Each structure stands twice: as structure tokens, then as C-alpha cells.
Amino acid sequence: MIRPFIVITLKRPRLWPALVSAAWAFRPRGWYRRAPFLPLPSKPYMRWRLETAYGDPEAVPPADEIERFVTWSADMRRRMRPRPLVPLWVKILLIVVLAGVVVWVNLRAGELAGLREVVATAGYWGLFGASVVSGFSPVATPIAVFYPLLMESGFAPVPTLATIALGMTLGDLLGYLIGNATRELAHDRLAGLRARAEALHARHRFLPLGLMFLYAAFVPFSNELLVIPLAFMRYSLIGVMTAVLCGNVLFSTMLAFGMSWVVGPGG
């Protein structure tokens, strides 16, 4: 049953993306729990598809029909996929422009007296508030990238990094509260998901917290992607926030000194 797919895979490498897409679309539930631990369609499902198509569950589809089917199905899935509101090229352009603005501001920090005055007036409380927003929002720029500007504005290194890390952690705390509220509001609607989540918590009590620390420290994406699920799985507030805080301290420190190394303190 699998042989014709193997043959067409070896003979027509150009079909690899379509074949992988079809295998993923037809993957059975829980495929990662059973050998060979690959998202391949199950034998009963394949037999059913062959019987409905050819009237025989043991039928061997011709190679040209397999090619037409996987190509057509991949094209249909691509067409059914919702179009993004913002095209990819626009997102890339915005990222490039934002990176350019950040570098320019830090390079010219010594010359931008008005901006330095505004930052200095905001003080540590303003820095803390901006860090909370950057910690909770998935699109906000990490405040640590403006470390050279902050140094030029009269901030001290250790209090600055501590304020940024604490603010980011408070923003992540809002994500934890959302995850916890979701679990409490779910009740019977997500009873099965709640049971599986709590079973996962019972089997792995500390590993996810370690992963949370590594994610917060080294992955430049919103921590809520892990904080909310951990809250839903009933991981303790203290455990999750401790991992997040330690990760945020390391992330902010590396980002701040990395930016200083690139542009110099205040240019």
C-alpha cells in the first residue's frame, strides 16, 4: 500500500512538498506516541480511501493518479488557507525599518538632546511601564534594545536592567492570569482538554518550567506563548514567574550589552 508512494517519492523529487503536505493533512491523532513516530496516514484510513476510490481496499493507484491527487490536494489546501491581512513583504519591510530606527536612535543618542530629556524625565517608572507593555504585547519592541540611549540619558546599568526585567515579568503575569481565568471559565466545555493538561502536569512537574526559562532567555517572541498554557495546566504562579523572571533577566542583559557592542554606548 505504501510502495507506490515510496516509488513516486524517489522518482519525482519535485513532488516532495506536496507529499509532505498530504501526509501531514492525513496524519492520525496521537501519531507521535506510536512507532515509527511519523505523521503518516494509518492503514485503516488508507484502505478506506482506496475502497471509496477504486472499490478495492487493496488497489494500487497508478503513479500518475497519485501525482495528480497530491498536487491537487496541496493546491486546494493552499487556496483554502486564509490570506494574511498584511503581506509577508510588508512585514519584512516593517522589521527592517524598525531595526534601522533602533540602530539610528542608539547611534545618535548623544546628539538627540530632546529625546534624552524626555527619557530622563520619564525615569525608572516610565521605563517600568514601557517594559510592562513590551512584556505583555506580542508586537512591542523589547525595551532593552534602547539600552545605549538609556545610558546616555543618565540611567544606571544595574537598576535599568532590573527595571526592564521586572516590568517584562509583570507583563507576563497578565498572561498567566489570562491562562488561569481561561481554565476556570472553561468548565465542561474544555473538560477533556483540562484533563489532558492536568495529566501532563502530573507527569512532568519541572521540565516545562526549565523550558520556560530557556524560552524566556533565548527566544525573541512573546513569553505568553508558553505562560498561558502553563497557567492552564495548573503550574504554580511562583514557579512560572520565577522561571520567567530569570529568563527575562538573562534575555534583557544579553540584548542590552549586545546592542551596546554593536553601536557603542550612545554611539
Image (cartoon, grey):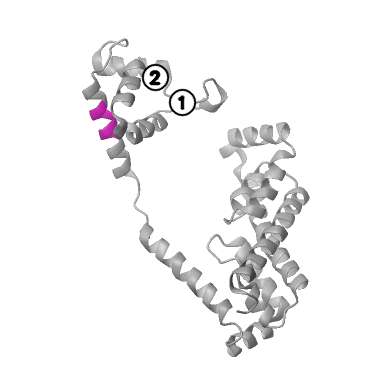
Q: Quadrant of residue 256?
A: bottom right
Is residue 234 at all visible to an observer of this figure?
A: no
Where's residue 21, x and y in %? 37, 34
In this view of the protein, which residue sits in the foreground, 106 or 92? 106
Quadrant of res 208: top right
Check the image and report above or below for 193 versus 2. below
Rounded to the nearest whole Å, what is the CA distance between mark 1 and mark 2?
9 Å
Residue name at image x 72 percent, y 49 percent: 240
Which residue is at 71% across, 31% downward?
203
The quadrant holding residue 258 is bottom right
Return the mark for residue 135.
none
Say which residue label 1 marks.
28
Tag count: 2
Quick one: SS at disc 2? helix
Q: Main secondary structure of the magenta part?
A: helix
Q: Residue at x 24, y 15 (%)?
A: 54
Comparing 38 with 131, the one in front is: 38
Circles 1, 2 touching at the beta carbon (< 8 Å): yes
Q: Which residue is mark 2?
A: 45
Given the image, on which type of amino acid does mark 1 rest? Pro
* For marks 1 and 2 on the same chain, the one whose residue lies earlier in the sequence: 1
Residues in magenta, as a range: 67-73
The picture places residue 185, in percent across and down from the top left corner, at 62, 47
In percent of the image, x 72 and y 33: which residue is there? 202
